[in-house]
Amino acid sequence: MTTHVKMVGPVVRGLDGTLADAVITAIETDNPDVDVDVDDQGGYIRIGTPQRCLLTRASLEDAMGRSFPLHQLEPSLAGFAGRMTVSDDEIVWYLERED
Amino acid sequence: MPALPRSEWYDLTRDMNWDLTYVTEDQAFPPALSNSFGVPAEDWWTWDEPYKIAYTEYVHNQAGKDQGLFSVNNVVSRSSIFENLDPGWKAAILAHYGAIAVAEYQASIGEARMARFGRAAAWRNMATYGTLDEMRHGQLQTYFPYQALNKEPRLDWAHKAYHTNEWGIIAARHVFDDMFTANDAVSTAIQLTFTFETGFTNLQFLGMAADAMKVGDLDFGALISSIQTDEARHAQQGEPTLKVLVKAGKTDTAQNLLDKMFWRAWKLFSLLTGLSMDYYTPIEHRTHSFKEFMEEFINKQFIDQFRDFGLEKPWYWDQLLNEMNWVHHAYHLGVYFWRPTVWWNPVAGTGPEERAWLEEKYPGWNDSFGKYWDVMGDNVRAGRPELTLPETFPIVCNSCQIPVCTPAGYAAGYLDSPLPYQLVRDGRKYTFCSEPCQWVFEQTPEQFAGHLSIIDRLLGGIIQPPTIEGALAYMGLSPEECGVDGNDYAWATATASKTA
């Protein structure tokens, strides 16, 4: 099969632009060595990095300027690419298979 | 809220598995309702959801979602936004509400079955949220259209559609009954939550949300993208179920469940989303073509995800890529031609600008599908629009229940033969639109053999009189409800040049 770069990361509701901006800023902070791809389709905003995408509560709260438990992301999280694992302090979107 | 971090108490509160002593496992989890596929009970207890949420958090989030959604709705429902929507967009949302609203309620039955017959306590916990989610979706998508009934009475098809035998609804019911209304819990997790919700609902609920925002239909865009935030969570029941099956050496079982429902979902969404994106959405507001959305959400995002578990692309992958070029163009021709049989007003979407767009997105469109529209345009311009309306019926696939369009695929150069697939079983001949549709049927023929397509019902004398009028009455369509050209044939007079 042809291989493509597997992008992973959140798809944020387009109505929640302020939160989307904060998520983008936080993901840029948490993934310093990669380019963060942002595809704003109006109704949704796809944010992605190759293969693994980290979002920490600390970075998100810095970007938001207030306390923000990660489960409160759900009302804006319309989807995501990759698999997702959530802990108290961080969310990781990832894919493992190489081919 | 508890003072401890969630991770320190979560497992304790939701892991309540125990050995059965008063009843057998089959009594507690009858195979018809919860097929374990031979995986021992203890193995299912390793089921661990990747997306964890406590009930307090769930309630807090859901209340916030509805508060946000209804603040949009309260403003928009008092405005004249609906009246000013493009006729094509109205066709798209009328089709959506009829095809989706009650199906969401039925999905809550499937979720509730997993909430009782799921094989692990953690799973049953997630499915309880899923049940509440789907009830929310059913209620929201009957309430929002209800508010605009005074502007478009056929919005009552949001509730009515699944109580009729309209042909598109027979097709939707056939696949949804298979997927969740009458499915066992384990198969439901793979087929509804993983295949359908992780994969295909993104097309209709996020792809159309992107278009809605550009069209200016804030209400619809807010609604369906909010619904999709629930889906993104409860769709995660698929992954741990898949992992248990794969770990137990049941990868082939999981692959088979996925292959079957992936194709079935494709057929339905090529009909619903394909028409909405490539013909009904006003051209100046289209974000991507249907094929481009398929490539983004399915061919990349979803395939990457399920290959990560060791599954592979379905065996019919090349046939899927082939159909992505043409099948929804054929469906659109059919729906437009048989427009009295649907509850919305289809727009042709084939004026000069639209045709240029279609040719760009689907090279060769003008020389293939465009020619049919040339003939219909000639008839309209000659003052004979009645020639663009049906006098007979198409043949319908005995699997997907959608008209067989192989002649159009053949004429467009995508198929080697115009003939349908046919199978004789116990003296009855079944007709299929494609090899995968026949394959779906043959996986569980006893499940499908007794079903009569709408054409079987017509030819078998169930629909009386066996005329267009008799069929429309059978489908629950009064003359006032039958679809008409949504733009009053403006596309035909706007056609400046012909391709043929």
Image: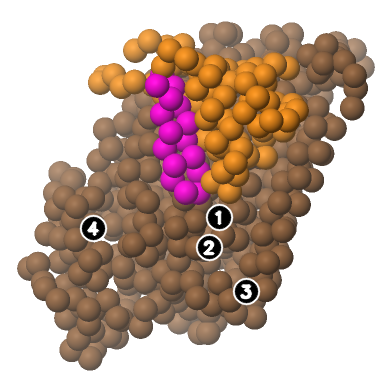
Chain colours: A orange, B brown
The residue carrying mark 2 is: B217
Depth-wise, is mark 3 or mark 4 nearer the camera?
3
- At label 2, counting other C-alpha atoms closer than 10 Å, the crowd grade (few under 14, some 14-19, many 20 or more) is many
- Going by the numbered disc 2, the residue's amino acid type is Asp
Q: Which residue is mark 3?
A: B79
Q: Is residue A42 magenta?
A: yes
> Residue at label 4?
B357
**Disc 4 residue type?**
Trp
Front-most of B292 and B172?
B292
Q: Which chain letter goes with mark 4?
A: B
Q: Are marks 3 and 4 in contact (CB under 8 Å)?
A: no
Chain bearing tag 2 is: B
Q: Main secondary structure of the magenta part?
A: strand
Q: Is residue B197 left or right of residue B304?
A: right
Dot 1 corresponds to which residue? B221
Residue B251 location in percent, x, y? 50, 15
Chain-order first, disc 3 or disc 1: 3
* Circle nearer the N terminus (3, 4): 3
Type of the residue with mark 1: Gly
N-terminal of the pair, mark 1 or mark 4, is: 1
Q: Secondary structure at mark 3?
A: loop
Q: Is residue B233 above or below residue B182?
A: above
Residue A26's place in the image compared with B273, above or below, is: above
